[in-house]
Image: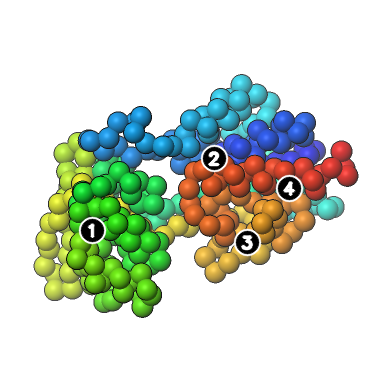
Amino acid sequence: MYDLIVIGGGPAGLTAAVYSIRKRLNVLLLTKDLGGKTNYRLGLPWIEDYQVIRGLELVNKFRNELEYLDFARHMDGVEKVSRKNGDFVVHTRSGADLEAHALIVATGAKQVRMDVPGEKEFTMKGLCYSALSYAPLFIDKTTIVIGDDDLALRSAGELATVAKHVYLVCAGEKLQASPLGIKLEKAENVTVLKNSEVVEVKGDEFARRLVVKNLTGKTEEYQADGMFVEKGLTPNSAMVADLVKMDDRGRIIVDSANRTSVPGIFAAGDVTSGYAEQVLVAIGEGAKSALSAYEYLLPML
């Protein structure tokens, strides 16, 4: 029986695990890998690593500590979480049943992909899934955003403040009737490609051109310095779907202390209803969830 099991080894999970270890909790980090989305970084021909502010360095410190403390981690996926006499049982893909008094769910979210030729080959090579992370690198550059929901509009809006030109590829007829949507339609450096879908990503070492098809079946190629797929996120929350409250997007609802609707279950990072899918935000959420879990566990220690 563990005091605490942390599910997920990305920025939030790593931070939560290390903070919990320093609180002298009997904690286990359960994950398929260490680092999560920080294992991927966008490559651009005009940018060197030293020019980018990343959470990677801080996350690597936590990862190195967990790699050294091999007793505190178990490399496995999670199928389901159930309750048992007021505690919790984590059922892993390898068939293990691990028990704990408390849980932190920090399993992140998956990007919704386009599933077109070239996408896989050029992912993180001029094409990525987080314009909000990389927008400052595109001053006076030409960019493309694919998507038409809130995330895509925010991404296009932020890019439009620095980029020379932004193409916004929308599957629908019109943008959302929001102040940002209206602003984008009127912006001189934004071209909205309505009723359009991506057919292929082309390039050399990096993604350079996007092939787009409209309703009439006509295809056209657009050249850009960077491309961003902003079709939303799918939270990895299925393992606790029967236990905690979630929003209409499947994200775990948490309060300001990262507590879920179930006492003893905490959540942090992109799997939650928190604001902004950013590494540094996830690190802070991981620390908060660990402190909240420690407070919950203190009477049992």
Quarter of the figure with residue 95: top right
Question: Which residue does the numbered mark 4 point to in the structure image?
Answer: 292
Does the residue at mark 1 contact the one at mark 3 (Cβ under 8 Å)?
A: no
The residue mark sitting in front, 4 or 3, is 4
Residue 222, relative to residue 193: is it above or below?
A: above
Earlier sequence position, callout 1 versus callout 3: 1
Residue sitting at x 84%, y 42%: 298
Amino acid residing under circle 3: Ile
* Image-based side of 75 in relation to 37, left or right: right
Earlier sequence position, callout 4 versus callout 3: 3
Say which mark, if any, is on residue 253.
3
Asked whether the viewer can see residue 20, the reply is yes
- Crowdedness of circle 4 by 10 Å Cα count: few (<14), some, many (20+)? some
The residue mark sitting in front, 1 or 2, is 1
Q: CA distance from mark 1 to mark 3?
A: 34 Å
Residue sitting at x 30%, y 43%: 137
Badge 2 marks a residue whose secondary structure is: helix
Does the residue at mark 1 contact the one at mark 4 (Cβ under 8 Å)?
A: no
Earlier sequence position, callout 2 versus callout 4: 2
Instruction: Residue lying at the far top in this picture: please name it.
Output: 68
